[in-house]
Image: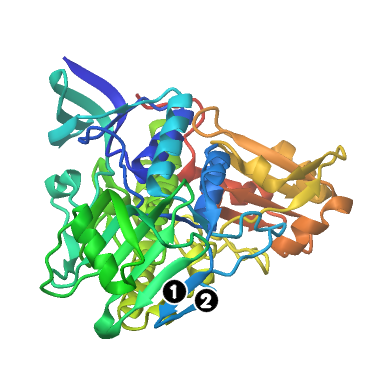
Amino acid sequence: MTDRIDVLVVGAGPAGLALACDLQRRGVRLRVIDAADHSFEGSRAKGIQPRTQEVLDDLGILAEIQSRSSLYPLLGAHVGPLTVPWVMIKHRKSTEDVPHPNTLLVAQYETDAAIKRRLEQLGGTVEYRTRLSSYEQDADGVVATVEGPAGTERIRARFLVGADGGGSAVRRTAGIDFLGDTDESDRMVVADVTLTGLPRNRWHIWPRSNGRFMALCPLPDGDKFQLMLKLRPNEKADLGQEAVDRLVHEFAGSKLHVTEVHWASVWRPNVRLAQRYRSRNVFLVGDAAHVHPPTGGQGLNTGVQDAYNLGWKLGQVLAGAPDDLLDTYEAERQPVAVRVLGLSSDIYTRMSSRPLAAVKRGDEERQLALNYRGGPLAADSGEESPNVLAGDRAPNARFLDTDGRPGQLFDAFRGAHFTLIAVGEPAVSALTQISWPGTGAALKTVEVAEKDAAGVRRIYGITSSAQILVRPDGYVAYVTHDDWTGTLSRYSTFMLPPAGRRDT
């Protein structure tokens, strides 16, 4: 018997789980499979950037992540007998438009677990020990063969999403090239360890000559540190407790003692990008589409934002929107990956040659400025505001609605819908002219009173009455100042299903 569903997600890392949460709340019939026995157990990706925090907030996950995280500590650079304090990431104050301004330090296993718990709250589940054996595409979608605890099963899905990492079986089967290279001579131990003799108030780094370095970052969930240690070209990569202890001694002396290795791996510079993100009804997200150096905190964040971009588009097409909407996933997300890959690679190169210079972090890594300007869903309407253009992240702002009730835009955005913000009396009155289909994502309207619109006007750069359509993933579709129905009509033909239609 063949199970029939809407979407099969292969891989239960952060990207796959985030996508599953978004699809689950949209009522999409889906299954999530993973070949592993259980969730990932290592810290690996440990930085949650501000933009990703906004995504997790929308999905109902951020509060738990915050409870298990900390802000990044000062760096402690060990140079001879001295420990020099160094600001790695500047701590910022929350502002009206950016309520989550700081990168959070949280081990990946905590992030994975939090997203997985949210999926379960939404009614979804992960099927572990279930491996994708093969799949074929036809006119109706994808037929996948999977091997699990109960044996072999065939699953028919309208769409299949590969979130199965750098060695993606989904990508290989689709025949999509993974462009880039791997430097086998450049290796680094990444491990979670418990050790004695080191205070937990610093991210400690020991720079050495010839590009070698060791770093120990205190993880916020107890007594563990994440170890990053660059090996010599021909040095043996022994990940046992005694061998790791010897490596640490070489850098820091016998005062430090590794008592336990909880998880360990050897990382090689493997910087790659999928040539395509789509093959008919098959899509790639996360590490299946791009792999990064473990520097700059970009890989996990880019993958989660891939999922956030793809989820609402899959939901819309399943509800009857034009299939061409799905082509915009690659058009929007692949350029972001190219840019982020360059940033991560540059940080890793500087880490190898000038560790203290490389550890400085700035606005680029926070990913708040990444945008889809000029993309297929952000055509220039000629009516954008000075501050916010079509394709930009929609910032938060406080306001009073026309009934005098206080609100914040991020609260209005939260959910699986589009949001139409009307500022000023003409724009509010024009909401009665809006026609919206009864299928796919709903439309939520926000009526901002003219006399109480100062925050929205200042942050969005609006000087006259305006309507702002915000996509379900929190990016601006358009800003218009008078052509209320015409502007929406131009976008609705591409992003929305016709009224009354739902594909099955």
Q: Is residue 141 left or right of residue 431?
A: left
Of helix, strand and loop, which one carries label 1?
A: loop
In contact (CB < 8 Å): disc 1 and disc 2: yes
- Quarter of the image holding residue 111? top left
Could you tell me which residue is drawn at 31 percent across and 52 percent down?
Answer: 259
In-image side of 170 versus 390 (left or right): left
Mark on residue 359?
1
Q: Secondary structure at mark 2?
A: strand
Around disc 1, counting alpha carbons within 10 Å, would you say few (fewer than 14), some (14 to 19), or many (20 or more)? Answer: many
Residue in the image at 69% along x and 47% along y: 409
* Mark 2 neighbour class, 10 Å CA radius: few under 14, some 14 to 19, many 20 or more: some
Q: Amino acid at mark 1?
A: Val
Q: Residue furthest top?
A: 1
The residue furthest front is 255
Residue under label 2, please give it.
86
Vertical relation: 109 (above or below) 102: above
Q: Quadrant of residue 376?
A: bottom left
Give 259 or 283, whichever is nearer the viewer: 259
